[in-house]
Amino acid sequence: MQHVSRVVSGRTTLPILGNVLLEASGERMRLVAYDMELGAESWVPVEVQEEGAITVPARLLGDIVASLPEATVEMASAEQSLLELKCGASEYTLNGLPAEEYPALPEVEGEVSFEITQKCLKDMIRSTIFAASRDETRAILTGVLLAWDGSQVKMVTTDSYRLALRAAGADDVKNVSAGDEWSAIIPARALQELSRMLDSEGDGEAVKVQASGERIMFASGPYRLLSRLIEGQFPNYERIIPTEAEKTITVNREALLAAIRRAALVARAEASKLVFTGAGERLTIQAESADVGRGREEMGAVIEGDEVSIAFNAEYLTDALSVMDSEEVVWQLGGPLSTALMKGVDDPDYLYMVAPMQV
């Protein structure tokens, strides 16, 4: 229920889409939620006395099940639109709707398919999804690009001010059937739900990914999630990734993150603007607000090239630094208005680009 109920939309104009489909057959029960864009399916082992199906309000059933005592749950539907539920001393009768009226989950049949470890997929989502746009007028940028370039599976997001890219390791992907190149733009909401579906430690069964021209499906163990894809052309991100840098800053990631978070407390009133200056082996972070005051942080760093003087949005930096695992990060900088590239020193599969602010 936790897996499927989150897919249910509270804004649907079709009452039955607020329900979850319960279908008992053989030795298991199938649970389905579908809002015509995103669908989730789950199976649970049960003892079936008589096969059948019904739909009931998803959120109500989920809340009831979550609060039931530790005991066997018995469900029965003597009438087509009523579900009787018993658990210990608890008894409920829920009004439902006939299963025949529930829309069928579409089949995802396409030539594109591969398997990826849960740990890798969860990390790819975590380290990119925050950079997707929330501006619905630019639908393409609200999605996440999943691509196969012939040698690697990559996930990319951008809101036009920043870009996050995570490539899967060679050992994390197998059984690829996608031709020389393939890409799809997946709604960020779908990947948020997929991340919740995956094992918290990432040690579960590998995820099978299958895509057609309009939809993509992720399946692992008793869970399946499918989503409609976003139509359109994703920006040519490879063209804007800088290949050379005028100067670089190498610094301890945790120290930098902590300093930025502190300085950001002052910078919030000024669009979270932080100014970074330094040369040689010292990096200074400054925040200033007419209403709040000033803040200054200084730390050790290795700065190569000309003296640094550049400004960034604090939130854009903390988002990326929070999901990186490297002990040290390196910034590759151009001019004061050139996009900066950030990487983990020992993580070649992740990069983050961010546009600076006016100093």
Image (spheres, rainbow, N blue to C red):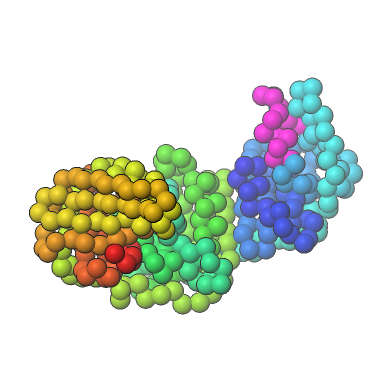
| Image-quadrant location for residue 246 | bottom left
Q: Does residue 71 belong to the magenta stretch?
A: yes
Q: Residue at x 79, y 22 (%)?
A: 89
Farthest residue toward the top? 89
Viewer-nearest residue: 45 or 262: 262
Viewer-nearest residue: 127 or 359: 359
Look at the picture and state if 350 lies above or below 230.
above
Tell me: 75 left or right of 211: right
Look at the picture and state if 13 lies above or below 296.
below
| Image-quadrant location for residue 357 | bottom left
Report the label total: 0
Farthest residue toward the front? 290
Q: Residue at x 73, y 35 (%)?
A: 64
Q: Does residue 229 belong to the magenta stretch?
A: no
Q: Residue at x 79, y 30 (%)?
A: 86
* Residue 272 visible in the picture: no
Pick the quarter of the image with the N terminus. top right
Look at the picture and state if 201 lies above or below 208.
above
Query: Whole-percent x and y of residue 270?
Result: 40, 57
Query: Whole-percent x and y of residue 15?
Result: 80, 56
**Magenta stretch bounds:** 61-74
Query: Whole-percent x and y of residue 315?
Result: 39, 53
Query: Whole-percent x and y of residue 274?
Result: 32, 55
Viewer-nearest residue: 266 or 192: 266
* Residue 251 visible in the picture: yes
Q: Residue at x 29, y 64 (%)?
A: 359
Tell me: 302 left or right of 355: left
Tell me: 74 left or right of 284: right
